[in-house]
Image: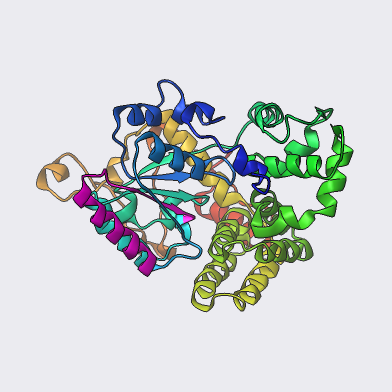
Amino acid sequence: MLNTPLAERMRPKSLDEVVGQTHLLGPEAVLRKALERGKIPSMIFWGPPGVGKTTLARIIAHTLERPFIALSAINSGVKDIREAIAKAKNQRFFDRPNPILFIDEIHRFSKSQQDALLGAVEDGTITLIGATTENPSFEVISALLSRCQVYVLNHLSRDELLELVQRAIEQDEELKSRSIVVEESEAMLQYSGGDARKLMNILELATTQTEGEVHIDNARIKELIQRNIALYDKGGEQHYDTISAFIKSIRGSDPHAGVYYLARMLEGGEDIKFIARRLVILAAEDIGLANPNALLLANAAAEAVQFVGMPEARIILSQAVIYLALSPKSNSAYTAIDRAMAEVRKSGPLSIPLPIRNAPTQLMKELDYGKAYRYAHDYQGNFVRQEFLPEEISGRVFYEPGDNPAEQRYRELIKTLWAVHYQK
């Protein structure tokens, strides 16, 4: 007990001890109801670090009195998966309930590793619970994803984090014997970033570094964190703050800051596929039509880092970051689709003009589907003015060219082709 970290000592043992996630675990919530019925599907917990994904999996196994087998995708392979499945099959002969196989960081499993789980999940040999900080739609193969229920776990709120601190001070065997006064909590909350495990680490650091009565204030916490910075940077624990700084630096055209935050993530063990995917998104969202080649380069980098792997992938990512940072910026494509989707939600499925409808049957032709359509290639310059939008929103502007040389040309082209038809 003496050497057990505070975060482990305060790990909840039952659903009633869990702080937060009331949308899943509240009295009428879906996951609690499933547990009360005693029957759960295979599932994937998707959420940021330190919100209780592993803890919840253990509580589920304990509540249902199921054997619990845990693997980490970081250091487990297909052989480990097959051994776990074989162990589960052997237990069938003793009329024991099928075990829960918990896989932490399941997004790090390759396709072949995920494929190895399919049969056992499908025939009920195991109930799979995967934990991931990444969107499972991108990282989990569709065949496995379709067999799992995805539950989203949220960041803990300020009040929930403070409740954890107070609970630890009052209930932990080691802390409750000491006089601990929390005078200020902002620094603890800021450095924890909604991560309960990190918060417990900070609280433990503050109490173990001080003898006698403990007074916790912002200055003291900042001093302790700076002296023990490796504890909080190791393993990419500042995931969300760092990726935010990374994206904003590139968006702000600062290649130096972009490369610095790239280095922070790489040194912290961040998944290079995650970094590359964010660069692809940024190339479309923040550079877009100001430099269409940016998306091509970002996509090529994303493919290359998977092919090459670390440590050489760092060079490819560095090249992409510098190029994207120094590219002209435009979010016109991003704002155009958002405007268009807002219109669709507002107006519903407006009637498509008859001339541009498909007419595969005689009846449709008799109803004037496709009638009066003008084939652009039959006209000079491969263009002829005609109405493409529904009548109710004729002339509505969704794409507004950005203020950059490439899109200024697009602005002039639209003006030339459409004259006054499209006006804001």
Please indicate whether residue 356 sits to the left or right of residue 184 in the image.
left
Where in the figure is residue 224, as x and y percent of width and height?
84, 47
Q: Which residues are magenta?
A: 78-105
83 within the magenta span: yes
Left or right: 49 with respect to 136?
right
Does 242 lie within the magenta span? no
Left or right of residue 137: residue 171: right
Would you place residue 194 above or below residue 411 in this image? above
| Residue extending furthest toward the top | 27
Q: Quadrant of residue 25?
A: top left
Q: Could you say where residue 97 lies in the image, as x and y percent from the top left? A: 26, 43
Q: Is residue 228 visible?
A: yes
Residue 395 is at least partly visible in this image: no
- The one nearer the camera, 281 or 68, is 68
Please state, as top left, top right, bottom left or bottom right, where the N terminus lies in the image: top right
**Above or below, 245 relative to 345:** below
Report the front residue among 282 and 355.
282
Frontmost residue, 420 versus 85: 85
The tally of labels here is 0
Residue 167 lies, in percent from the top left, at: 66, 28
The majority secondary structure of the magenta stretch comes to helix
The C terminus is located in which quarter?
A: top right
Where residue 42 appears, as percent x and y from the top left, is: 33, 45
Q: Nearer the viewer, residue 289 or 316?
A: 316
Q: Residue at x 54, y 75 (%)?
A: 309
Q: In the image, is 44 to the left or to the right of 257?
A: left
| Coloration mode | rainbow
Q: Is residue 297 above or below residue 161?
A: below
Instruction: Identify the residue at horizontal 49%, vertical 65% (top origin).
Output: 75
